[in-house]
Image: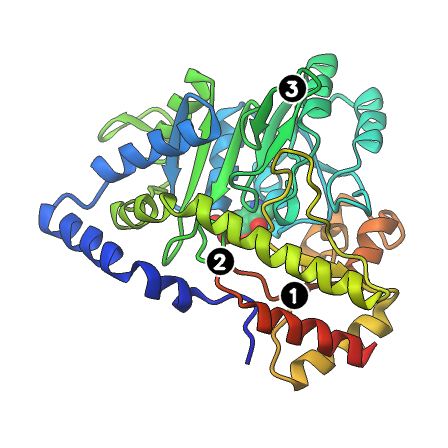
Amino acid sequence: MIPLFDLTRQYERIRGEILNAIDKLISSGNVILGENVRRLEEEIASFTGVKHGVGVASGSDALLIALRAMGVEKGDTVVTTPYTFFATASAPYRLGARVIFVDVDESTFNMDLNQLEHVLKKEKVKAIIPVHLFGRTVDLEALSFLREKYGVMILEDCAQSMGSEWKFSSGEIRKSGSVGDAAIFSFFPTKNLGTYGDGGMIVTNSDEIAEESRILRVHGARKKYFHEKVGYNSRLDEIHAAILRVKLRYLERWTEERTRVARTYQKLFEEKKLPVVYPRVEEKGFRYHVFHQYVVLFENEEVRERVREGLKERGIQTAIYYPLPLHLQKCFRDLGYQEGDFPVAESLSKRSLALPMFPELRDDEIKEVVDTIALFL
Ligand SMILES: Cc1ncc(COP(=O)(O)O)c(C=O)c1O
């Protein structure tokens, strides 16, 4: 059996350190918003290259709280893509904002910035939520340009892209999460930096957005029991922060290993000359992709399903991210979209397949995956 993702192999490598960190934390008796959350916030802000980090209960909550802290409210317009995890769009929707989707670019799976600019020319948009999908960075320079030109706010969804980078024409290299007014991370177990449960973080250079997020995560109270607004119970637990602080020290090594896995897939796909579109480990001199997922494209749905069944028969796990684009979800019917509105997202949802990807995946396993794909093609 070759899993899509395996937490247990990673745990074997760090078990002692994790158990020590948990033991130390519980022995301290201080398990809510203490030293570990504070230090993790500093470490992740510094890793991203921004001023503040605010730990919250999940990536989904981070999106909701960040948008509110940025001043998004009922009636505002927020733009994102229909080809992402549900929470990216449900967050503005829950705040009563009008959600507009923009199709993605087939070669990157990310928001098509030309189509975004068409929308910005026509509509009064309050905020954009670009998603660095599967770990691949959206063009940060183009995003900064649009932000300035149209005076629109940006919330980067970095749930899948921790550590990914973009090189500006000035030569400067910046991480995803450092360009928007704010950005969010998810620490869901499968993420590149994940805990053993749920967690998330908002990062920002803005003192106001950080302060507002800190208030919103504790029921809208700056001072305990004195509520300025109706907020949420959405703290990052100390136990998760303690675990994440251990794991953050390994992130660089794990990202290298994910890149090694992607490179091995690439070499095998190249050798076999298979009719499969796969992401390339381009040697651009910067880390534009951190391979949260390794997603390939087949010619059509029939071929994808045949290969997927074949892999399943041989005990190889795969997943479809995402089988139904968000504009076609039942709960978003009132947004007024229909089939055909976003042809690229619709086509990707029928042709894409996520293959096993995690730092500990072995070369012989990767070979077996590719050999099996070749067999069923
Ligand atoms: C792109 C994207 N945004 C947001 C989220 C939400 O994160 P969480 O699962 O921590 O709520 C996820 C996680 O699955 C995600 O992949």
- SS for tag 1? strand
Q: Are marks 1 and 2 in contact (CB under 8 Å)?
A: no
Q: Is residue 146 left or right of residue 117?
A: left
Identify the image quadrant of residue 318. Answer: bottom right
Q: Nearer the viewer, residue 69 or 118?
A: 118
Q: Which residue is mark 1?
A: 355
Q: Position of residue 145 (x, y in %)?
A: 72, 17
Q: Kindly report the distance in space between the C-alpha atoms of the residues bearing marks 3 and 2.
A: 32 Å
Q: Which residue is mark 2?
A: 190
Q: Residue at x 41, y 67 (%)?
A: 9
**Mark whose residue sits in front, 3 or 2:** 3
Q: Residue furthest bottom?
A: 313
Label 2 near ligand 1 (CB < 8 Å): yes
Which residue type does callout 3 highlight?
Gly
Q: Which residue is mark 3?
A: 171
Q: Position of residue 129 (x, y in %)?
A: 64, 34
Q: Kindly report the distance in space between the C-alpha atoms of the residues bearing marks 1 and 2.
A: 14 Å
